[in-house]
Image (spheres, rainbow, N blue to C red):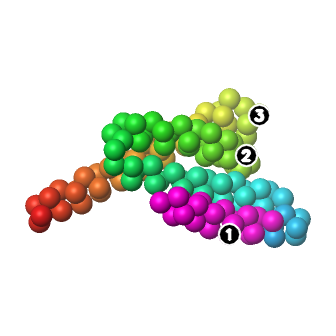
Amino acid sequence: MLWKVLLATAIPLAIMTSIGLYLLSNGESSDGRSVLCVGVIAASVSGSSFIYQVERWPLKRQSVIHLGLMLVTVLPALLLTGWYDLGTAGGWWGAVITFVAWGIGLWTVLYLIFTWVNRRKARRG
């Protein structure tokens, strides 16, 4: 599984870093920085999704570990994108609310999908 995690992390990071560096080299600093940050976000989300495949861990533990990884990777990258005016409290809150809303939303949607899939498998099996 380690190779899968490394590939899932390295591929989006390499692609987005290449695009971001290209933009930076062409003087598009704002877009380049955003793309680099999105690369970190994509790599973090993609690589950390494998936490949910550790079957011996309960969902609560998987979720807490995943949240911890997102707090140290995705949230700082989101803050560095330049999308939010961090000179104001509203900008900081906007970034944090975006992080929380997307996190809760995606976790809930994926939980419901996998619950439905597992129920269908159990009925067939």
Residue 124 lies, with reference to residue 80, above or below; the image says below
- The amino acid at mark 1 is Ile
Q: Are there few (<14), some (14-19), or many (20+) residues within 10 Å of tag 2? A: some
Query: Are the residues at dot 1 and dot 2 in contact (C-beta closer than 8 Å)?
Result: no
Task: Calculate the distance from the C-alpha at mark 2 to the C-alpha at mark 3.
Answer: 12 Å
Q: Which residue is mark 1?
A: 15
Closest to the observer: 84 or 125? Answer: 125
- The amino acid at mark 2 is Leu
* Sequence-wise first label, 1 or 2: 1
* Residue occupying the point 63% across, 63% down: 10
- The amino acid at mark 3 is Gly
Magenta run includes residue 125: no
Q: How far from the left and from the top, in percent, is residue 33?
A: 77, 56
Number of the label disc, if any, that sits on residue 80: 2
Tally of numbered discs: 3
Q: How far from the left and from the top, in percent, is residue 17?
A: 73, 64
* Sequence-wise first label, 2 or 3: 2
User: In this rendering, would 125 be left or right of 97?
Assistant: left
* Residue occupying the point 74% across, 69% down: 19
Q: How far from the left and from the top, in percent, is residue 27?
A: 89, 65
